[in-house]
Image: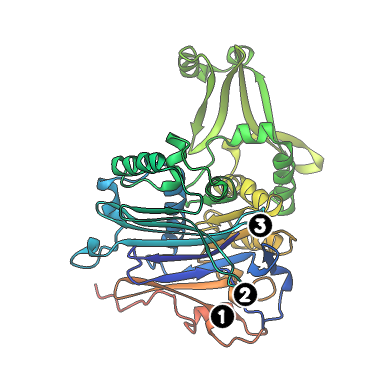
């Protein structure tokens, strides 16, 4: 579970900003939205982030994604790449380091705080601690300050010299990635913390689609059934989703568009390729044990008098395809307890539909989390979202600031959608006079 994120001198955040999932325990509404992280800390399961275009909503999610990529990919960052992440609207953007921190709890109940400071020349400081969750002292797992290293499980002097040499060679690499090159850090907390980023944290961007979507549905019956139930529940006229798999050599006899696929497949010994049409994966061709198979997603749809027909993904609307890509994320949050962050959750989806999706998640009993950016005011309804779950983002002098509706005195009967549109809570665009 994500507990909090701190950003400073990163993209549009000049000053330190904190986003957190801590509830106001004096609020009595929607108590099922609160779960206990590590069995002891009240934590919210949902958050919605609002703000005008260009205010920096997406940059908060990009901050989390940046940390995830940094701690899971040694080669994510380099000197030419780092300059684009500093807050740019000042004379010397790199005069101060980028500062990022994240506190989280794994599904197994281990709590950690990871923080990093990054300059033009590389990582200046990096710390991983076991979090005491405010009740106990935090415990150091490792600390990196310049050339100085300290570890809870101390490596030998020889291994420490190897680590220092590796860091000199890879100045932009997180110490959490060193075991990918050479297994020198034996503290299990390092692997546990890194695994949370790998396996329990999922981010979906504005234009994201899942490259392995067909294979995911083909191999995971539970996700397929969940998606069918979800699409049926929101009344899209789709009864079931399924993956149709055929022998490729049989399929090509009746399909003219097979030639370019054959050419690519003939060069492959194993693996697979995808055919993308209209920015969606139409078919997936794999070579398994020397046998070529072609798979595609099919949607059983109904017409008049009970007539039904299987339609492929090209026949589906952009909104349906977006839902198809969101469904595994909702599954991961609801059924698997993962933390899911979605940028512009309403993209290509009707307001009523996205409202129903959020309501579905709101009613679930899960330790998973759903955090999303949106402009959709129909979600500002105290019947299924708490005011401490709503965050506002706005810019002042070019720098992004964040605050929660929890900062306002709002009775549980107030229409917060109307209040937001009337500008009571800020985070809306200011429209000046347009003279032409």
CB under 8 Å between discs 1 and 2: no
The answer to which quarter of the image holds residue 353 is bottom right
Residue 69 in view (yes/no):
no
Please state which of residues 313 and 129 is positioned toward the viewer in this rendering. Answer: 129
Residue at position x 72%, y 52% in the image: 235
Label 1 to label 3: alpha-carbon separation: 27 Å
Residue 359 at x, y percent in the picture = 69, 64
Residue at position x 22%, y 64% in the image: 95
Mark sitting on residue 23: 2
Q: Is residue 171 above or below residue 134?
A: above
The answer to which quarter of the image holds residue 302 is top right
Q: Is residue 231 above or below residue 402?
A: above
Residue 150 in view (yes/no):
yes
Q: Dot 1: what SS?
A: helix
Residue mark closest to the camera, 1 vs 3: 3
Please name the residue that numbered disc 1 is placed on.
406
Q: Is residue 49 above or below residue 189?
A: below
Residue mark closest to the camera, 2 vs 3: 3
Q: Tell me which label, 1 or 3, sits earlier in the chain.
A: 3
Q: Tell me which label, 2 or 3, sits earlier in the chain.
A: 2
Please name the residue that numbered disc 3 is placed on.
109
């Amino acid at each position: 579970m994500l507990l909090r994120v701190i950003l400073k001198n990163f993209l549009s955040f000049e000053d330190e900003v904190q986003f957190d999932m801590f509830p106001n325990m004096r609020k009595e509404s929607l108590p099922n939205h609160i779960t206990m992280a590590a069995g002891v800390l009240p934590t919210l399961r949902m958050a919605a982030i609002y703000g005008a275009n260009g205010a920096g909503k997406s940059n908060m999610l990009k901050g989390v994604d940046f940390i995830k990529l940094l701690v899971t990919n040694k080669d994510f960052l380099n000197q030419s790449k780092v300059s684009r992440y500093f807050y740019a609207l000042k004379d010397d953007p790199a005069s101060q380091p980028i500062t990022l921190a994240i506190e989280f709890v794994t599904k197994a109940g281990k709590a950690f705080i990871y923080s990093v400071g990054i300059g033009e020349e590389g990582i200046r400081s990096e710390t991983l601690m076991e979090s005491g969750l405010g009740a106990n002292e935090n415990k150091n797992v490792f600390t990196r300050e310049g050339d100085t290293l300290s570890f809870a499980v101390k490596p030998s002097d020889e291994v420490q010299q190897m680590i220092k040499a590796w860091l000199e060679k890879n100045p932009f690499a997180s110490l959490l990635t060193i075991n990918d090159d050479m297994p020198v850090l034996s503290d299990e907390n390092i692997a546990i913390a890194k695994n949370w980023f790998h396996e329990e944290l999922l981010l979906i961007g504005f234009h994201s689609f899942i490259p392995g979507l067909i294979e995911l549905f083909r191999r995971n019956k539970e996700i397929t059934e969940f998606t069918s139930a979800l699409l049926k529940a929101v009344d899209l006229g789709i009864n079931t989703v399924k993956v149709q798999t055929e022998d490729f050599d049989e399929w090509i006899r009746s399909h003219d568009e097979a030639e370019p696929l054959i050419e690519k497949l003939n060069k492959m010994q194993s693996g697979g390729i995808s055919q993308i049409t209209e920015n969606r994966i139409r078919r997936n061709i794999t070579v398994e044990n020397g046998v070529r198979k072609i798979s595609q997603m099919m949607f059983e749809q109904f017409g008049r008098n009970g007539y039904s027909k299987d339609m492929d993904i090209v026949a589906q609307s952009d909104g349906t395809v977006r839902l198809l890509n969101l469904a595994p994320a909702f599954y991961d949050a609801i059924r698997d307890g993962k933390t899911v962050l979605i940028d512009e959750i309403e993209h290509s989806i009707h307001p009523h539909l996205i409202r129903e999706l959020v309501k579905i998640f709101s009613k679930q009993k899960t330790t998973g989390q759903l955090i999303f950016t949106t402009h959709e005011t129909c979600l500002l309804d105290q019947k299924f979202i708490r005011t401490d779950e709503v965050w506002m983002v706005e810019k002042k002098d070019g720098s992004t600031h964040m605050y929660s509706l929890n900062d306002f005195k709002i009775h549980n009967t107030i229409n917060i959608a109307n209040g937001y549109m009337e500008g009571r809570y800020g985070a809306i665009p200011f429209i000046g006079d347009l003279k032409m």
